Image: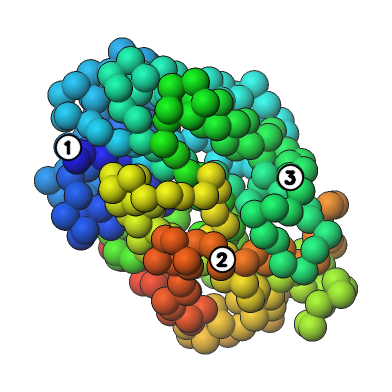
Amino acid sequence: MTWLVTGGAGYIGAHVVRALRDAGLPAVVLDDLSSGHESFVAPLVPFVRASILDGERVLEAIDAHGVTGVIHVAGYKYAGVSVQRPLHTYEQNVTGTAVLLAAMQDRGVDRIVFSSSAAVYGTPDVDLVTEVTPKNPQSPYGESKLIGEWLLRDQAVAVGLRHTSLRYFNVVGSGDPSIYDTSPHNLFPLVFDALVAGRTPKINGNDYPTPDGTNVRDYILGVDLAVSHVAAAQRLDSGEPLESAYNLGSGDGVSVEEIMSTVAEVTGIPFEPEIAPRRPGDPARIVASGELAARDLDWRMRHSLREMISSAWDARRLAEV
């Protein structure tokens, strides 16, 4: 049973590949390195440099490595930028997924774990997001992820595709010091970049209706997320039932102020964050229930906030050596 991990040279995909390896499940990585790094690919794991838009290369990878299932992590993941690049976002995330599914159908590969996103919910007006919370994506990125879920649903009806979608919230930290978040838009890299450059990190708004006035979000460690991908893959292999989608959330959020104070403790760089204006449309709180994933996918928060930040900081410093 070999699993093709699309986007397996990226921050999240690389964690998934290592989790598969640790579980004794063979993997092959397909990644075009548009945002991934070849150095992130786990040792001895076959690597195919190609885009999921290239159906012929996807077919070649399936044939060459005896692929029996796919964990689809590849995609354009910058929600904010997707507003300025909607066509690119849809091409990568919708057309790319359709091309991948066509290749799978052609070769009889009938199981897939899809990397979805909390962005499918938009800005929900509930204290705790569950899988049945109404979907209201507010960016081309969120819309593209929801369409990806629909494509899987429709292929299940058409050809019996077995599938599940994992909706990520805020993925942080590192389960391997050789893997780190290189996104120019995510909170941890932005804070670390500012500190390394001698600048003061910013908080966008401190007058929200939360305990300390700053946004509350759901932060999860990448290695914990990866474990649940493996659990989903194993259930698909064994024919066990799965929900069509799962939230991977903590059930208990963390404020931006809490993150900033913990970053100062972990890095040993004291600072008082600069307070900037609110960003338009930023909700006060987005926190998700992970109950269904805990039931089916071995999902749980195995690490504290301090451990998440420490792992991210250690990986960042190692990358600069």
The picture places residue 227, in percent across and down from the top left corner, at: 35, 61
Distance from label 3 to label 2 (Cα)? 17 Å
Q: Amino acid at mark 1?
A: Pro
The picture places residue 95, in percent across and down from the top left corner, at: 53, 20
Distance from label 1 to label 3 (Cα)? 37 Å
> Where is the C terminus found, in terms of image quarters?
bottom left
The image quadrant of residue 147 is: top right
Residue drawn at (64%, 64%) of the image: 288
Q: Which residue position holds label 1?
A: 46
Q: Amino acid at mark 2?
A: Gly
The picture places residue 213, in percent across and down from the top left corner, at: 82, 77
Q: Which residue position holds label 3?
A: 135
Q: Which residue position holds label 2?
A: 290
Which of the pair 41/313 is nearer the observer? Answer: 41
Q: Amino acid at mark 3?
A: Lys
Q: Earlier in the sequence, mark 1 or mark 2?
A: 1
- The reply, left or right, for residue 262 in relation to residue 99 is right
